[in-house]
Amino acid sequence: MNNKKTIAIIPARGGSKRVPQKNIKMLGGLPLIVHSINYAKLNSNIIDAIYVSTDDEQIKKIALANDAKVVDRPKHISGDTEPTITAVQHLIETIDDIENVILLQPTNPLRPKDLLQEAYQLFIDNKLNSLFTVTRDEKKLGKIVDNKYLPFNYKIGQRSQDLEPLYFENGLLYLTTSKAIKQGFIISEDAYPLIVNDKFSAVDIDTNEDFEYAEYIYNQKKTF
């Protein structure tokens, strides 16, 4: 019998320069982080426990009040430039018998209701090391070099519908084995890119403008 667990990890440090107290800023009457906690709760048939990694007392109190467990993140891995992987590695080092990790970023508070169910089934059925969500970007992209515009994914005059498909990492969710995380990967080299085409894919909060857009989308389509 397999007693190893699948856990959700929500990394939420306290410092945010562009949007002060971003992770507890209210969206739709709830602190931002609570949207990801509630999404994990909706998937309790998959998730054995919900953990928040934080260095902030206010975030800790809100997480605990909403039935999440908290692991205190050391200050030396809580800085602006610290990658998410170090917080995730630190957390799983403190917990025994973890098999799979579902990473839910608080800055992506809105997710399609059945997304995790679909992703987890793919993950298990195909015995994947990791899976992450992507969305097609249909913009005509280019670079500016020496004040000259150089098209990147198209030729001048080409129709948008004829572009070669390009995709962006939308941050909605990540599914990874604990083994891959211990090796330093949230997205492994053989990671499965799950395509998600949804309004929520464009909601990723880093600025006040992003937050305003999240409020607009939330009010348009309330799902939880």
Image (tube, rainbow, N blue to C red):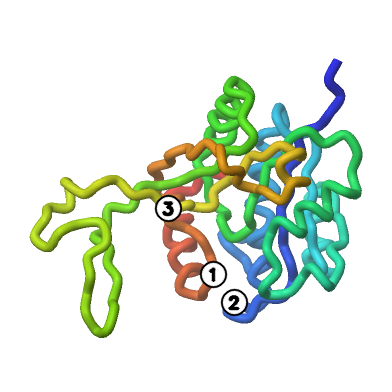
**Could you give the CA–CA distance between mark 3 and mark 2, rounded to whole angstroms?**
23 Å
Q: What element carries label 3?
A: strand
150 to the left or right of 32:
left
State the residue at coordinates (40%, 47%). Answer: 135
Residue 148: quarter of image: bottom left
For badge 3, the amino acid type reads Phe
Q: What element carries label 2?
A: loop
| Residue 38 image label | none
State the residue at coordinates (61%, 43%). Answer: 188
Above or below, 203 relative to 56? above
**x and y, in percent, of residue 203 in the image:** 47, 58
- Is disc 2 surrounded by few (<14), some (14 to 19) or many (20+) residues within 10 Å? some
- Is disc 1 surrounded by few (<14), some (14 to 19) or many (20+) residues within 10 Å? some
Q: Which of 65 and 157 is in front in this view?
A: 157
Which residue of the protein is positioned furthest toward the left in this rendering? 157
For badge 1, the amino acid type reads Asp
Q: Earlier in the sequence, mark 1 or mark 3?
A: 3
Q: Is mark 1 on a helix, strand or loop?
A: loop
State the residue at coordinates (60%, 46%). Answer: 187
Disc 3, disc 2: CB below 8 Å?
no
| Residue 19 image label | 2
**x and y, in percent, of residue 184 in the image:** 71, 51
Q: Which of 176 and 23 is in front in this view?
A: 176
State the residue at coordinates (48%, 39%). Answer: 193
Disc 2, disc 1: CB below 8 Å?
yes
- The quarter in which the C terminus is drawn is top right
**x and y, in percent, of residue 71 in the image:** 86, 56
Q: Which of 48 and 188 is in front in this view?
A: 188
Q: Name the residue under label 1.
A: 206
For badge 2, the amino acid type reads Val
| Residue 168 image label | 3
- The quarter in which the N terminus is drawn is top right
